[in-house]
Image: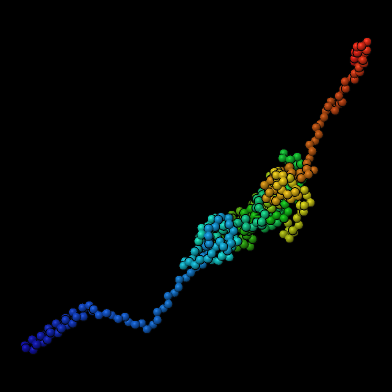
Amino acid sequence: MNLTKILAGLLLVLAIGLAIGAWMLSRPSNRPVSPVASTAPAAPKAPLEQHAVVVAAKAIAAGQRLTAEDVKIVQLPTAVASSFSSADAVLGRTTVMAMAADAPLFEQHLLNGLALQLENGQRAVSVAVKEPMAAGHHVRPGDFVDVFFTLDGKTDQANVDTQTRLLLARSRVLAYGAASVENPPPSAAQRKVQEEDTGSSLRRGSGQRESQNARPDNANTAVLAVPLDDVQRLTLAEKYGQLTLALRHPDDSSVPEASLFAALPTVLQPVAGRLPKGEPLQPVDRSYAGLRFKDLAAGADAKNTRRPPAPVQTAAARAPKAQPPRQQAVELYQGSAVQTVSY
């Protein structure tokens, strides 16, 4: 009995001691905790990736040709989609809209199209074409053609003889129908690959329709590169005559010697004394002065002008008119009086 009471007292004392120890451990410590020194060195921080973007160095007007002073390259933390990363890609190109300073340049901000295919002093002119008058639709973008002008002499604009002559020599074809030098028609091999790659009959039919629309035999217009001084000659000839495109070899560079023929007179005449004597008008001034169709058809000296037929006279009109009888007069003197008598 006494042994049981002793064991119970010891267990009670042990339980109290354990409770005090647990309470002491649960109390927050006020001592500062020293950080554990790291033995490994800290990894260096990676630099942010930079992207080169071409932007406008200053405000740029529309239609301005870009130079090295107009653009600059800036580094941005994020890439700009469809922008330029090199200034060489935009130098020498022309803007189609005004650009603010520091604005990124994109492809749609720069001029594209057939205008870039023209040489200085040329204009792109569209003319109507038909198969018999365009080498049987064998003309392709990039070819060179001679443009012939045919006039039947029945026009009311000028009384001239029926004629055919070379109007423009070695004109470059920029576009023929839907095809152009920038978007040439696919070759037979390319069309075959496109048809093989078409998966469904619907897509195949759509591809065939697009191919048919681009075929040269569906073309009804041709765009030619024409010198500015010849634009009015071409437009007048197309309006009042018939044009024929004669395909020529690209290595054939022969052209007529225009100095052998007299220059056609202009509609507007320069002010006296403003143009130095013997100096011809510049092409842009001749275009402004204009051209008459009768001068284009007959030439500067008008030797080709057809004279109107003489009016037809009737027999009665051709018969000589009856002359009135010739009268004679005599003077009679009676003393101092004088009298004239006709008979």
Residue depicted at x 72% and y 46%: 273
Q: Position of residue 86 (x, y in %)?
A: 55, 66
| 34 displayed left or right of 45 | left
Numbered label tally? 0
Q: Position of residue 201 (x, y in %)?
A: 55, 58
Residue 231 seen in render: no
Q: Position of residue 206 (x, y in %)?
A: 56, 56
Residue 189 occupies quadrant: bottom right
Nearer to the camera, 252 or 97: 97
| 163 displayed left or right of 202 | right
Nearer to the camera, 238 or 89: 89
| 318 displayed left or right of 125 | right
Residue depicted at x 66% and y 49%: 127
* Above or below for 309 versus 338: below
Residue 256 occupies quadrant: bottom right
Residue furthest to the bottom in view is 3
Residue depicted at x 60% and y 56%: 113
Nearer to the camera, 143 or 124: 124
Residue depicted at x 21% and y 80%: 25
Residue furthest to the top in view is 335
